[in-house]
Amino acid sequence: MEIRSSGDLALAGPGRVRGYAAVFGSAAHLGGFDEIVRPGAFADSLASGQAIRALYHHQGDALLGSTKSGTLQLREDDHGLQFELALPDTTHGRDLAVLIERGDVAGCSFGFTVPDGGERWEQRSGTFLRELLRVDLREITLTSDPAYTDTTVALRSLDKITEYKPSYQMLWLETCR
């Protein structure tokens, strides 16, 4: 699974949070390649009705909401993947509301896999470009740990890029705004 983050997080009212878990069109520089998320990349996942979870720091035991229960709402707009989340009245939910209000937690992220045909690779001026055209969205997360606040994407770990279309088992990437 791959992970991206951004810093568009704000309280939308008592017990509600909104932001963007992904932003379209910005090139992310990942060392071995650049990457761009294209509009429509989440459309199939959103239309499928599959359960997508909201988590704190990508921790499965820190569930904040889900599309299945209606506590997480997701939509694509011209800017990116927008969400609104009703925080639960749990330790994680109450603590998170305080941390967001203080500005300690300002990052958003999403976890996904890329289905066959969901990406396009090309080489431009000696740099590989990966365009995400369609992804299977698994989760969004709220985080205080966006790796680099002055970049769009920061590399967490990456197996190896050895050829034009890299072979990989799993990428862990985090984006920041």
Image (tube, rainbow, N blue to C red):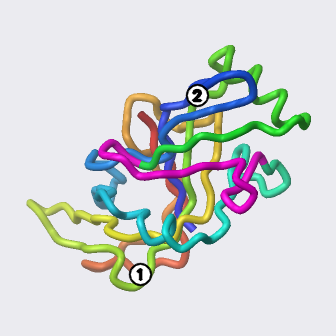
For mark 2, give the secondary structure: loop
Q: Which region shows up in magenta? A: 64-80
Q: Is residue 35 visible?
A: no
The single residue placed furthest to the top in the displayed view is 102
Q: Which residue is mark 2?
A: 106
| Amino acid carrying mark 2 in the image | Ala
Q: Position of residue 113 (x, y in %)?
A: 51, 71
Q: Is residue 76 above or below residue 20?
A: below
Q: Is residue 143 left or right of residue 116?
A: right
Q: Earlier in the sequence, mark 1 or mark 2?
A: 2
Q: Residue furthest front?
A: 70
Res. 18 in view:
yes
Q: Residue at x 36, y 53 (%)?
A: 30
Q: Residue at 63%, 18% (x, y): give it.
A: 103
From the viewer's perspective, is residue 33 above or below residue 11?
below
Q: Nearer the viewer, mark 1 or mark 2?
A: 2
Q: Which quadrant would the N terminus be assigned to in this image?
A: bottom right
Label 1: element kind: loop
Q: Position of residue 149 (x, y in %)?
A: 45, 29
* Number of numbered callouts drawn: 2
Between residue 77 and residue 98, name the one nearer to us: 77
Q: Which residue is mark 1?
A: 167
Disc 1 marks a residue whose amino acid type is: Ser
Q: Residue at x 55, y 72 (%)?
A: 170
Q: Height in image: 133 above or below 5?
A: below
Residue 147 placement, left or right of 131: right
Q: Is residue 151 left or right of residue 74?
A: left
Locate the C terminus by quadrant. top left
As for residue 77 lying within the magenta part, the answer is yes
